[in-house]
Image (cartoon, coloured by chain):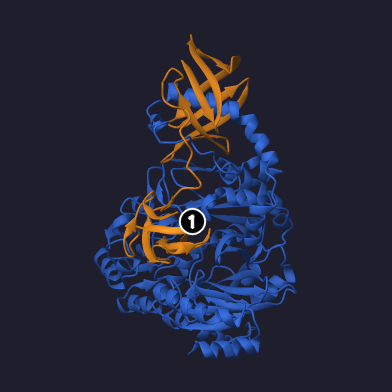
Chain colours: A orange, B blue
Amino acid sequence: MVYEVMVDGKPHRLELEKAASRWECRLDGKPVNIDAVITRHNVLSLLVDGRAYEIKREQTATDLHIWVGTTCFAVELRDPRSLRSRNLAAEDEKGPRKIFAPMPGRIVRLLVVENSDVEAGQGIVVVEAMKMQNEIKSPKKGIVKKISATPGTAVNPGDVLAIVE
Amino acid sequence: MFKKILIANRGEIAVRIIAACREMDIATVAVYSDVDRAALYVRKSDEAYSIGPAPAAESYLRMDKILDVAKRAGAEAIHPGYGFLSENAKFAQGCADAGVKFIGPTPHSMEMMGSKTRARQEMEKAGVPVVPGTSRGLVSPEEGEEVAARIGYPVMLKAAAGGGGKGMRLVHSREELRSALESARSEAQRSFGDSEVYIEKAIVNPRHIEMQVLADEHGNTVWLGERECSIQRRHQKVLEEAPSPVVDRDMRRRMGEVAVKVAQAADYTNAGTVEFLVDQQKNFYFLEMNTRLQVEHPVTELTTGLDLVHLQIRIAAGEKLPFAQSDVEIRGHAIECRIYAEDPDNNYFPSPGKITLLLEPSGPGIRRDSGMYEGWSVPVDYDPLLAKLIGYGTDREQAIMRLQRALGEYFVAGIETNISLFERILGDADFREGRLDTGYLERLLAKGNAAITWDALERDAKALEPIAAIAAGMFAVLDPASPGSKNGDTGGPAATPSNWKRKGRSEALR
């Protein structure tokens, strides 16, 4: 098995091969002495040259996180033979920015109207969740192009609340 | 002794009360809203009944439904926990009228203390020191401006019915007062159904220290030592400890005696907490009395060796306090971390959702009071408190070390939690030295955004990067039944976790 593993955006080449009762591992061409046991779903006990690590895997809505002890890494696993583009463009800071609901909740009120000028950090909409009212702020200075949030309605994480350009 | 108790609450405190009941061989009745059917406390109870839809006003605050369940199930007593109906005198009266024992003080004591303005009036009468301000609600913004001008800014606006920072505003100047009063009133109305707001001089950078009291129904009242609760955010306590690093034996005795005086002035029975503001000269002022079991009661349990819920139940059943003041000994040190479903990367915004993986610490000197389990979805409708992790040791230093160890073992995936915040607090020099006040946490958080260098953290992360790469591959071959295949289809490269998220135990131990 050969993987290209992106760890926090840095590429590594990982070769894994089952040899009798153990795994042979080469990372970036160098052999590494490892032993790995899945202790339960999403929890891995990994020994690397005798050093023990408890590793947790967490799949979030968008990313795969690998926790080494209490340190978290964003990881992508790729098969290098795949033709999938590796250079997906990052979001353009200069263009319109969507403001997403960061969590489930209810829209309490709007703090601006469409086409108003806003500063970076200015509140756009108030969302209530778990008894706390929270202002969702504009990520940039610009003009509120669109408000899609309606007071009184429920929102889910990832829902677009407004667009600032 | 009671044979069956109804718990009019949810979450970790319901689990904790059920545990006490089971220990005392008392059957338990849980009540739940639609979104709490799968909650841990429902699983742990002997009987459980639905009391309505998710909003608390339609379920956990519905006295009629709860009393109806109590009657149907044959519960002889109701434990209200904290929050919800716990400090509602009408509910206590309703219980009495229905012939069900309310585990807490009498409606009369609750009324006196439930209104902060009335409590202030009574305490002034009893000669207990209070913070300068009004002892009745403000009738107009003009009156507020006038009083503030007299006692001097900054001032604090507080809901008379308040608690937990709701309906509370710090006002620095006359210009801010009107709008602050308006929003405090509307929040008070929303949270407590009572818009009365009064004004107090704001003591700058006070400590918030409270004294646990316990009173039986035969006239015996004792104090059980203080809890330091200065570490707060938005007036919500985050970390509490007992004893306080600044309270010595003599001050403890003086605070305890004032607390007992407060309780006696209110004819108080059962468990209660007298909160004090302590200024930089260690003068203490009566702030309010909480007529319920506190969230942070475990630190007192660990340092006194007493079980407050057992004692609450025994007192409610008419027993005398089984010990005297002179028997109370404070031993060791305990610190509680409130584990909230909050996102440290997003200004501690609540983070409900499904818990996909849960690894929980235990072991020497660790107590964990939890309401969550793996696979459970944290509902959006209530407080984000998930669990409390309490470290106990011979001294403060050891309690901190044990907590740091346990926090490193605590892992909650699927939702965000504030666990990393505690690693930060426990490693902070000011915390270590006990230099605390109610502004401590805001300062620490502000410092984090500006002055902290992350070099060492980056170095640690770099050393572990190859381990993460190997682990990702091993998961893929050994534990493939995961949604990891979603990767690469998300339209962009995975975002690097922020320094907060990856903040490691290594930093806390430094």
Residue A115 coordinates in the image, percent (x, y): 41, 62
Residue matched to label 1: B349
State the image coordinates of residue B13 (x, y, percent, origin top left): 44, 59
- Report the quarter where the N terminus of chain B lies: bottom left
Q: Work out whether residue B488 or residue B320 is closer to the camera in this orientation and state it.
A: B488
In the foreground, B300 or A89: A89
Which is more toward the observer, A149 or B289?
A149
Taking the image as shown, residue B36 lies to the left or right of residue B506, namely: left
Q: Is residue B94 above or below residue B339?
A: below
Instruction: Answer with left or right where residue B454 lies relative to residue B191.
Output: right
Of helix, strand and loop, which one carries label 1? strand
Q: What percent of the width, then of the height, locates residue A103?
A: 41, 52
Give left or right: position of B463 versus B31: right
Q: Is residue B490 visible from the viewing direction of this image?
A: yes
Q: Is residue A118 left or right of residue A33?
A: left
Where residue A73 sits: x, y (%)? 54, 35
Front residue (pair A163, B376): A163
Total marks drawn?
1
